[in-house]
Image: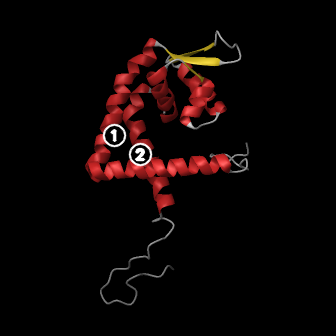
Amino acid sequence: MPRSVNEGRPGGAEKPEMDPVKTGAAYMLQVAARLQTTSFLNRVAESGVHPAGAYVLHELWRAAPLSQTELSMRLDIGNATVGQTVKRLEGRGLVLRRQSTEDRRVVMVDLTPKGRALEVFFHRETQGLTEEINRVLGIKGSETLAKLLTRLADHFRASLADAAPPEIDARGRKP
């Protein structure tokens, strides 16, 4: 049985000790990311597009057409993952793939009119989520969080670039 902070205190309610793993930054970052992703999915469910697809669409809204390799680099995810995501978006009629006219080995990804039409919807839902975060943290807190998360992302991006090839990927599978 776990030791309690109030053990031996008269009338004190049993309160388990704080778990240093579950209250640490790494664990809480994962929990917050998972819950934020679920919140985002609930907001955009009617579109049928999952977060990975939304990230691809966002990059295309900014600069279509793009090669699958360029999408992979912009999103910090592997070519195979981008390929699977683009295939799902293509199946929904949101993007189309074609060979580059300059280099037939390069696959270019572009938006369809249906894909372009989702931009306003996704922008509105993303803005709503941002406003929710601002209500919870305040604007200064939200700005501070964004700066801290950017520092962490930059750190992990650099450390992964310097590291030996992983024995397992982000999903726990052998590459």
Q: Is residue 136 above or below residue 99?
A: below
Residue 39 appears in view: yes
Q: Is residue 165 left or right of residue 142?
A: right
Q: Residues within 10 Å of mark 1 (few under 14, many from 20)?
A: some
Disc count in the image?
2
Residue behind mark 1: 129
Q: Position of residue 33 (x, y in %)?
A: 46, 48
Crowd around label 2: few <14 · some 14–19 · many ≥20 (10 Å): some
Rendered view: 166 above or below 55: below
| SS category of the residue bearing label 2 | helix
Residue at 51% x, 19% y: name it: 92
* Residue 136 seen in the figure: no
Q: Amino acid at mark 1?
A: Leu
**Could you tell me which residue is drawn at 41 percent across and 45 percent down?**
36
Which disc number belongs to residue 36? 2
Q: Give the CA distance from mark 1 to mark 2.
A: 9 Å
User: Position of 148 compared to 134: left or right?
Assistant: right
What percent of the width, then of the height, locates residue 5? 40, 82
In this view, the residue farthest toward the top is: 101
Label located before the other in sequence (1 or 2): 2
Looking at the rendered structure, the kind of residue marked 2 is Gln
Determine the residue positioned at 32% across, 35% down. 127
Question: Disc 1 vs disc 2: Cβ atoms closer than 8 Å?
Answer: yes
